[in-house]
Image: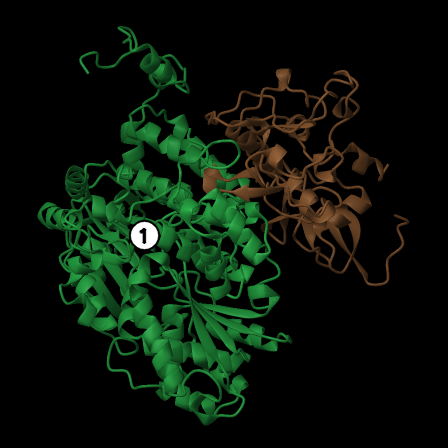
Amino acid sequence: MSGTKKETGFTFTIDGIEITATAGQTIMEAADEAGVYIPRLCDHEGLRHQGSCRVCTVKAGGRSVAACTQPAAPGQAVENETQHLTKMRRDLVEMLFHEGNHLCPICEASGNCELQAMAYRLDMTEATKFPYLEPCRALDASHPDIALDTNRCISCGRCIRASQDVDGKGIFGYVGRGIHRRVAVNGENLADTTAEVTDHAISAEVCPVGCIIRKRVGFAVPIGEREFDKGLIGHEIEEKRK
Amino acid sequence: MENGHKTGNGVAAPACEVAKVPEEEIAAICARYGCDKHRMLDILREVQDRYRCIAPSTMDRIAAGTGLTRIEVEGVASFYSFLSLVPKGRVTIRLCDDIVDRYSGLDAVTAVFEEVLGIRTGETSADGAFSLETTPCIGMCDQAPAAMVNDVVLTRLTPETARSAAEALKAGQSPEQLVSERFASLTPHERALHMVGNNIRHAGEVLLGPVPEDAGLSNAVSMTPAQIITTVEESGLRGCGGAGYTTGRKWRFAASERAEKHFVICNADEGEPGTFKDRVLLTERPHLLVEGMTIAARAVGAREGILYLRGEYVYLRELLEQVLEERRRRGLLGEAILGVKGFDFDIRLQLGAGAYICGEEGALISSCEGLPGEPKTRPPFPVNRGYLGYPTVVNNVETFCHAARILDRGAKWFHAMGTEGSHGTKLFSICGDCLNPGIYELPYGHTVRELLEMVGAEDAAAVQVGGPSGTMIARDSFHRKLTFDDLATGGAIIVFNGARNILEIVEYYMSFFVHESCGYCTPCRVGNVFLQKAISKFRKGLANPEDIDYLKELSGTIIETSRCGLGMTSPNPILSTLKNFPLVYSAVSKPSKDGIRDTFDIQSAIDGARKIAKRRSYIFDKDFTQ
C-alpha cells in the first residue's frame, strides 16, 4: 500500500490505527492491506468469505461482528486486539480443539498447523476448562495419493470452497446438522471422487490443519523449520506495516 | 459421541427400498418440480414420503436430475430431521418430547407405544412397518402429550388412547382412520379440528373477533404502495415472531430497493417450544393471512410469494392449499387481483422438514431456496437481497394478519390499543401448569400476574416468557408487563408450578438448542454442547461454585460470537435462571474439600471397556447390585 487514498476510499480505525478502505471492502480485507492482522481460521486468501469459525470477531460500532464478512464503514472505530476479544477467540480455538481429536505431538501438520499456531498466538497456555468430546471419526485412505484424517477437521470448509470455486469440482461438502455437521466427500469415499493431488483444494495451504494429507511427502520439512517456527501466525501481514 | 449419520463415506447403510425404484420414478419427481434445484426440499420430501428413505443411489439420481452434485443433495437430506438416509417405517410415529409433554405424562404414553409396537424409541421394526421417534415441540403444548403419526396429529394422549391407537395401527388401520372413520368425507377444516383443538380462550378485537372478508385488501387496491406502507408504519405494528422489528420500515426498505423482482414470504415456522398461536391463525384465519400477504405484495411490488409452513404442521397443508385455490378462483390471487390491472400476485406453499432454525429469517430463505436451513451472512439483509438474491419481505403469520386488519380499520384504531411502543393486540399461547391452556388475544401491557389469573395458574412458581430463547421469571417478577420494552415474547408463555425442577427444565432447553443448532458457526455448534454438559453436572450434584462462573463466561462467549439469533439467545435458559433462581444453583453446588475440581468421571471413562470385558469394578461401580 502506498498510503495514498484511493478514489472511492475512506478511512476507519482498528485499535486506533487509521486504515484506508474502499467501498465494499470487508474490515479484514482492508486490515490485511494495511498490515493489521485479525486472527482467522475459516477465511483464506482467494476463497469466498464464510464467517463460520468466528475467530475474527471484532467490535465495530459497539457490536460484535465477523471481520471477514462485515463491510468496513467510514469513520468506524474497530476493536481487534483487546484483552476481551483475545479471550473470546481463545475460547473459540479451545472449542475447536475439544470438538475434534487433536494430538499435536503425533500430527504431521505440527508446526504448519494454523489451529496450533493460533493457539500460540492467543496464548492458550493454561490447561483448558472445556470437556473433550472425543468423537469417533473416520479415516479415509482410499485415494492413491491423498488421505483424510477427519479427527483433525475443524469444519472450516476451505477445501469445500477451493474445490467448488477454484477447481470447479465440488469434491467436498457439509453434511449433517449441529454438532454432527461435518465435511464429507462427494461419493462413497475419496477414491470414488475426481480428487487429484494437484487440486488447489488438496494443496498444503488450503487445509489449515492435518486433515487433508498428501501421501508420501510427510515430514519432508523437519520440525523446527516449519512455517510457524519462523514466526507467529499473521506475521507476514504485520510485517507490511514495519 | 455418536458423530453424524452412518451413510456414505465408507460406512454401509442398510439396504433401502428405493434401491428397487426405477430411475424414471426419481426423474419424474424431479420433473414435477421443473428439475429446479431450488425445489430440493419438495423433491426430497416427496422421495421420503414415497420410499421412506433417501438412499445414496437416490441422491445420485436426484443430483443428476437437478444438476447438482451428490454431496450437495446429501447436505440437504442430512440437515432436516424429517428426512432420513436410512429406511423408516411405513408409519412413523413422532412423539412430541417437549418439557410440557414430559410433565403431562409422555413417559407412560411412550411406554405403551414401545410395548405394543415391540420397538424402542429410535428404532424401526424389522418388518419395516413402524418407526418410533421423539421430536421437539410440535406446537401442541395446550393439548399435550401429542404425537405426529405420518401426516396426522394425535393430541391429549393417555396410556389408554395411546394403546388403542397403537393397536389399531398394528391391526392395519391407517393413521387417518385413527382421526375419524369418516376422514375421507370431512373437509380439510373439519379434519384439522378433529385432530387439533383451537383452544381459543379469549378473542380480542383485531384477530380472533369477527373479521370481515378482504376489507383490508379492498382498501389497499385504492391506495398507492407508499400510502399502504405509511399506514402500516403509523399503526406502530411490530413483528410478532419474536424479534419485534417495525413492519412498516421493513416494507419500506424492500419497496425502495430497485430490482427486477420482489418477494413476500410468510414465516409459518413457529418452532419456539411452547408457541402455537400461528397454528390457530392458520386454521381459523387463513384468508386473513393471505390477504395480509397480498397487501404486502402490493406495497413492495412483489408478484410472487411463499408460505413457509413448518413440517410439523403438515396436517394443515390441504386446508391452506384449498384456501389458495379458492382465492385464485375468486380473483384474489393470480393476475389482476380484484380487477386491478397490473396487480398480479400468487403464492406457493413450501413445507419445512423439521428444523427450528428455519424460523430464522435467513435460514428460512435458505430453506425456500432448497438449501440446508442455514442463516445467511448479514449484510446484505433480506429486504435488500433475500430469496434468490431479490429484495424480500419476511413476516410472521400474525404480523400479516394484523397488517390486513390495519388496512381495514386504519392505523389510528390499531395504534390506540396496547402501550407506547407496543401497539395493538398480541396472541399469547399459554400452556404448562394452568387450568386453561390455550390462546389469549390481549392488548400489550398486561402483567404476568393478570395473565396467570386468567389462565388459572395462581400457584405458578416460574414462568418462561418467550420460550427457551426468552426469559424465565420467578414470583418476584410477576408484576412485569408483556411489552416489547419489558418482557418481550413471540407469544409463548409456559407456566411451571412449585413442584417442577428448574434445572431439569434448563437441561431440557439446552438439549433442544444442541439438537437445533445448524452447526455453521463454532460457538453455537460446540459451545451449547459444553453448556449442556455443565448443566448435567449440576443435575448430578457434581458442580462446584466455580462452575457458576464457568456457565456465565461460556454463555458470554456464545452470545457474543454467534452468527445468528439462535446462538445469541441459546444461553438464556441458563442466564435467566442464574439471575432469577440463584438458590437453585447454589443449593446443588458445593465447594470441593480438597480444592480439586472434578473434570474427569471415572465411571463413564471405563464404561466402554467394562461392557466389553463384562466385568464389574468393586472400586468404581457406584451400585454393585445393579
A35 relative to A164 in the view: left or right: right
- Please, which residue is most extreme toward the left here? B160
Residue B531 figure quarter: top left
From the image, tell me which residue sits under label 1. B273
Q: Nearer the viewer, residue B390 or B326?
A: B326
Question: What residue is drawn where x is 63% and y is 54%?
Answer: A61
Reply above or below: B588 against B438.
Answer: above
Reply above or below: A23 against A240.
Answer: below
Residue B325 figure quarter: bottom left
B469 relative to A2 in the view: left or right: left
Q: Position of residue B458 (x, y in %)?
A: 15, 54
Q: Position of residue A152 (x, y in %)?
A: 59, 28
A172 relative to B603 in the view: left or right: right
Q: Residues within 10 Å of mark 1 (few under 14, many from 20)?
A: many
Q: What number of labels is visible? A: 1
Q: Is the C terminus of chain B in the top left, top right, bottom left or bottom right quadrant?
A: top left
Q: Nearer the viewer, residue B314 or B97?
A: B314
- Please, which residue is most extreme toward the top here? B618
Q: Position of residue B137 (x, y in %)?
A: 30, 51
Question: What residue is drawn where x is 42% and y is 20%?
Answer: B599
Question: What is the secondary structure assignment of the residue under circle 1?
Answer: loop
Q: Which chain is brown?
A: A
**Residue A28 seen in render:** no
